[in-house]
Image (tube, rainbow, N blue to C red):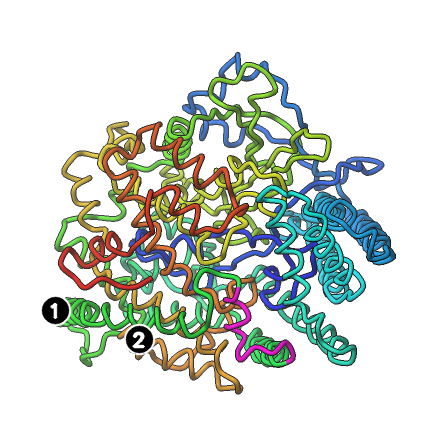
Amino acid sequence: MSLSTRAGSTVASSFTRRRTVLGIGALAAGLALVQRTDVSSLRWPSTESIRHMVTPPTGPPSFLHRSHSSLAGVFSSLSSIHDPAMASLTAPQQPPKWTHTAQEILDLTKAAIATHKKVEDRIAALSPSECNFDSVFLDLSDAETEFDLINDPLSFYQNVSPSKELRDASNEAEVLVRDYSVDSSMRLDVFKAKQAAEENIKKSGKKLNAEEQRLVEKMVLDGTRAGLALPEEKRNELSALQKEVSQVSLEFSKNFNEEKGIISFTLDELKGVPEDVVSGYGKREEGGKTLYDVTFKTPDIFPIFKFAQIPTTRQRAFEGYEDRLSINTPLMEKMLSLRRQICALLGYDTWADYRTEIKMVKSGKNVKDFLADLEQKLRPVGVKERDTLLALKMEEHKEAGIPFDGEFYIWDYRYYDRKYVEKTLDLDDMKVKEYFPVDKVVPAILNIYQTLLGVKFVEIKGETWHPDVQQFAVWENDAKDASGFVGYCYLDLFPRESKYSHAAVWGLLPGFTRNDGTRHYPLTAMVANLAKPTPSKPALMRHDDVVTFFHEMGHVFHGLLSKTQFARFHGTRVARDFVEAPSQMLENWCWEPKVLEKMSSHYETKEPLSSDLIEKIVKSRYVNIGLFSLRQLFFGQFDINVHTSKESADYTALWNTLRESISLVKGGKFTAGQATFNHIAGGYDAGYYGYMYSLVFAADMYATVFKADPLDPARGQKYREKILRVGGSRDDIDSLKDFLGREPNSDAFINEIFGTGEAKSAL
């Protein structure tokens, strides 16, 4: 669990160095997913490396569920699910149970804090001569891991539990952990023990392996970045600021996760929205009219952006969506103010400089230079695309007799982007959707990954947090006994009230080597919100949903197939501006003709996508790429602007004016869109640039290794060994060079987006 990343603001203690959970916010922002998924408002949850304490309650609480057959059909075609040989194997580690009560969540959290504090107290009491690798660094690492084993699942409940009592207790427990994390991070006595141990290791000539040496370096750096070199008065001030910003960040994210707003339209106002979407809306009578209640969840509101023919309907929907979390406006102002105070105390020029110091990009200035360079390249492309869509709008308004004011608005973008694709490519998104029923796509994607990476999924039955959750044991494809066990995977794919509202992957258990040499195995879970079946059709996925799912499974396998000595370096615990690159690379599979054919099956005819339709889908990939990318750059520019500025500002005005100037689309009334930008609270503060930054690496990896044969298991094994297996146990640039056989460059990225012959961009 990373409280530094969880709040996106706290200076983490030594036991809270973990990766934030990965979600669609990062996935969809990639240029590879050019189906125009809006990522500005998606929450980046912060729970990481979630583990489970198996202490059972006195009796099963009412929220306890067992997996059942509600989604069995989704996985019936997965080749290894019912493999008798695999099913007969016994895993060396049992899956966690989900039987906590609200009181247990709080009691276990307090007990874990007390236990961890005892370890730190013992280490702090060591004399300098007693400080060494085992007594300090190894013991601290073990204590961090044990702390996570108990507390991380308790934090997970707030995102998925159907019980409000559990969600509230989970949030309350997280506050306790955050506050303790701040206290732990400021322990000068523990930091001095680390310094003494590091010095004694050097003097003794003790040989550490590369991962052990990395552990020492990172743990010492934790203390330096926590401000432990400051005088006591400043440390106390810093501690108070950290606790305050942690609480503000948690409240911001809680508001985001529990937002339940609706906006209502008549059927006439919803003209153009597909019938199967409208049939899923709540319906009521008011004032003699039938109203349809639309939530701000993606499956409900996005079809209005894309299909509603009446401009005022799209405008109302967009402005309601942007303003749905105005309650967060003062929280953002407070959060940014506190961060400015913290970075000043720590001696950093800006918050962005503090946050990027440990990333590949290294400084706030480098981020601004990267974004400015990319914006300069994309702007001419975006202007041309906007003019094309504006002409399409003018033509439609003229035919419909709607007044045309010559402007292209933000609520016009998705609608005319779709119309343009349909007109120029004769590509109907709703028709394509019919070829991607969930019960075909999910097992097809899992089968592709199984073949590529040499593993097998076997469905198991057990306790989960909701009946819709599916559990799998994952094995090496040639497993004969327990030695071939890889870990566990959970899929929670469909929306429900108060569940995390987008798509994300949680590392519920990390893998690591115990002190006795045995392994602790990982567990990863995907939480998504795929469309549910309607009265007339089964659950269907748009192509961009397919891309998202493929990307998310990339994170799942990063968590499953990493094999590091320490939990701290497991899986996706890599630099934040690299963490998306592997999964962004994997999005490319969803644009490969033979993969599209393999994944598709019309829900009625069972026929795969035709070669003609596949060709159109592939051609649509970079349609209007300039406007899409400029919109992503707007999010990055807002993020880096507020985190390099040394003074407060009117953030609502900044959000709206920056969007208009960078995205090349006009707005209407000022809306508090920044209050929905949960990346800033959820761990991606001064980090949104990373979505675009990592695309450079993603394009290079795919073009260099996979492009010639994307489904080649030998290439998959190379990827598994050189990228997935090592996790964060070495510098990411070293993993890249090992995989590529050379230094990475931007050639593939530039060629892919702009075509050959463009000037090369520096990383």
Binning the other alpha carbons within 10 Å of mark 1 as few (below 14), some (14 to 19) or many (20 upward) gives: few
Q: Give the camera-side residue of 290 and 64.
A: 64
* Screen quadrant of the C terminus: bottom left
Label 1 sits on what residue type?
Glu
Q: Residue at x 59, y 16 (%)?
A: 481
Element at badge 1? Answer: helix
Does residue 310 sit above or below 710 in this rendering? Answer: below
Q: Which residues are magenta?
A: 345-357
Q: Position of residue 28 (x, y in %)?
A: 38, 54
**Displayed quadrant of residue 554:** top left
Label 2 sits on what residue type?
Ile
Residue 329 as seen in the image, left or right of residue 191: left
Label 1 sits on residue: 395
Q: Mark 2 or mark 1: which comes first in sequence?
A: 1
| Residue 160 visible to an observer of this rendering | yes
Tell whether position 347 is magenta.
Answer: yes
Tell whether position 626 is magenta.
Answer: no
Residue 48 as seen in the image, left or right of residue 547: right
Q: Give the camera-side residue of 726 and 533.
A: 726
Element at badge 2? Answer: helix
Label number found at residue 671: none
| Cβ atoms under marks 2 and 1 closer than 8 Å | no
Label number found at residue 662: 2
Residue 165 as seen in the image, left or right of residue 429: right
